[in-house]
Amino acid sequence: MDKVAILSEDQELISEAKEILSPLELITISDTRRLEGIDTILLDIDSVGTGHLDTLKKKVFVIVITAEKGARHLLESMTFGAFDCVLRPVASSGMSES
């Protein structure tokens, strides 16, 4: 089974993602150096920025989450190697399909 982690400081987003991705176990991480066994990272660029993207993309699939509706974050994320970009609110975004 795939291991999915979320890197976010937004507790509401973490709860929402856990509910949507159930029955998968969603692990909350704060340290990008400890990724053993993780296949996919949900990266909340609104709370932690894009600085981790370059490091993460070399090790795992990265799905960026943002509330920013403009194309800036989408283009930046995909340019720097994100697998997908999901807009908030995640409940209506199709995150489970990503």
Image (spheres, rainbow, N blue to C red):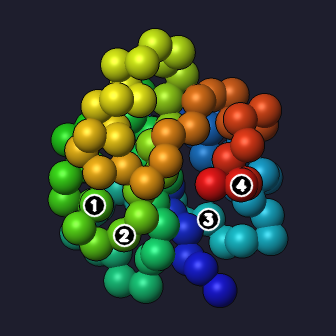
Judging from the image, what secondary structure is the residue with disc 3 in? strand
Question: Percent x, y for residue 41?
Answer: 45, 60
Please give the residue where the numbered disc 2 appears in the rendered image: 60
Please name the residue that numbered disc 1 is placed on. Answer: 56
* Nearer the camera: disc 2 or disc 4: 4
Q: Mark 2 to mark 4: distance in Å?
A: 17 Å
Q: Residues within 10 Å of mark 3 (few under 14, many from 20)?
A: many
Residue type marked 1: Leu
Which class describes the residues within 10 Å of circle 2: few (<14), some (14-19), or many (20+)?
Answer: some
Kindly state the secondary structure of the residue where label 4 is placed.
helix
Image spot of residue 75 (x, y percent): 34, 29
Dot 4 corresponds to which residue? 97
Three-letter amino acid code at disc 4? Glu
Q: Identify the mark nearer the N-term, 1 or 3.
A: 3
Please report contact status of discs 1 and 2: CB closer than 8 Å, yes or no: yes
User: In the rendering, at what x and y percent does residue 98 appear?
Assistant: 63, 54
- Residue 74 in the image: above or below residue 42: above
Which mark sits nearer the N-terminus, 2 or 3?
A: 3
Q: Amino acid at mark 3?
A: Leu
Residue 21: percent from left, percent from top: 74, 59
Label 1 residue SS: helix
Left or right for 54, reference 93:
left
* Gap in angstroms between the C-alphas marked 1 and 2: 6 Å
Which residue is denoted by mark 3 in the rendering? 26
- Tell me how far mark 1 sits from mark 3, CA to CA: 17 Å
Task: Give whichever of discs 4 and 1 has the lower sequence position.
Answer: 1
Amino acid tagged 2: Val
Marks 3 and 4, the one that precedes in the sequence: 3
Residue appearing at x 49%, y 47% in the figure: 84
Q: Report the side of 77 relative to 18 (left or right).
A: left
